[in-house]
């Protein structure tokens, strides 16, 4: 028997320790929670993307009475970016969540389906994407690539 141990590197920063660009991206993600359409969960998620050209685009979760037809904030933002700026890679993504009147104390982490979509973005543009996960106690988890969140991933190289 052989054992394989995988590790995930997460750097935990206070918001004040983040760079100005990181702070701007996190603020954009927080602001994007305001326009989430969440009549079923009341859990508002915002995602902000820093594109290769320096522009920031945002998305939020969009729910549906037929629950699986809704979409998470991360994929809403990524598909918007890919549809409108197909030539721009995504340098970084920030995610924040708002629930019952406040930002969630724990950082919000992308669901499995969103991780798979973020992996596709890294493979498509051949560049790792920085991940910034915001927690309401003003902590920010920073990861260097989606691969940290999706080990043993299935990507184009498997096909
Ligand atoms: N949600 C996101 O938008 N992003 C995540 O990372 C996790 C979950 C959404 C889906 C649903 O609209 C609500 O949050 C509750 O699960």
Image: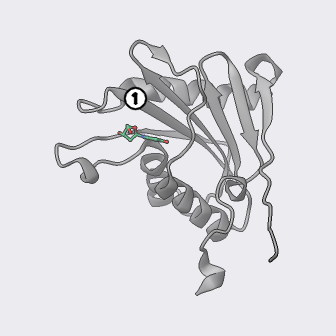
Query: Viewed as shown, does residue 14 lie left or right of 27?
Result: right
Q: Nearer the viewer, residue 119 or 68?
A: 68
Q: Nearer the viewer, residue 2 or 82?
A: 2
The image shows residue 13, relative to residue 76, as above or below, that is above
| Image spot of residue 114 (x, y percent) | 50, 54
| Image spot of residue 50 (x, y percent) | 64, 43
Q: Residue at x 56, y 34 (%)?
A: 108
The image shows residue 6, relative to residue 153, as above or below, that is above
The image shows residue 113, relative to residue 152, as above or below, that is above
Q: Residue at x 80, y 61 (%)?
A: 5
Q: Quadrant of the N terminus?
A: bottom right
Colour style of the rendered protein structure: one colour
Q: Quadrant of the C terminus?
A: bottom right
Q: Residue furthest left?
A: 65
Q: Residue furthest top?
A: 101
The image quarter containing residue 140 is top right
Q: How many marks?
A: 1
Q: Nearer the viewer, residue 151 or 130?
A: 151
Query: Viewed as shown, does residue 52 lie left or right of 144?
Result: left
Q: Residue at x 53, y 56 (%)?
A: 85
Q: Is mark 1 within 8 Å of ligand 1?
A: yes
| Image spot of residue 33 (x, y percent) | 44, 27
Query: Viewed as shown, does residue 39 lie left or right of 15?
Result: left
| Image spot of residue 6 (x, y percent) | 78, 59
Q: Secondary structure at mark 1?
A: strand
Q: Locate ligand 1 by image quadrant.
A: top left
Residue wearing tag 1 = 44
Q: Residue furthest front?
A: 1
Q: Nearer the viewer, residue 106 or 28?
A: 106
């Amino acid at each position: 028997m052989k054992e394989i141990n995988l590790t995930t590197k997460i750097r935990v920063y206070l918001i004040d320790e983040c760079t100005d660009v990181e702070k701007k991206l996190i603020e954009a993600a927080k602001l994007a929670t305001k326009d989430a359409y969440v009549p079923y969960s009341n859990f508002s998620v915002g995602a902000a993307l820093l594109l290769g050209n320096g522009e920031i685009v945002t998305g939020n979760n969009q729910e549906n009475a037929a629950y699986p037809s809704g979409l998470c904030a991360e994929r809403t933002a990524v598909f918007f970016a890919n549809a409108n700026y197909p030539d721009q890679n995504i340098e970084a993504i920030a995610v924040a969540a708002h629930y019952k009147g406040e930002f969630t104390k724990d950082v919000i982490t992308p669901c499995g389906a969103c991780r798979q979509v973020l992996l596709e973005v890294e493979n498509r543009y051949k560049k790792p994407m920085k991940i910034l996960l915001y927690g309401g106690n003003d902590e920010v988890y920073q990861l260097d690539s989606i691969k940290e969140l999706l080990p043993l991933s299935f990507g184009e190289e498997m096909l």
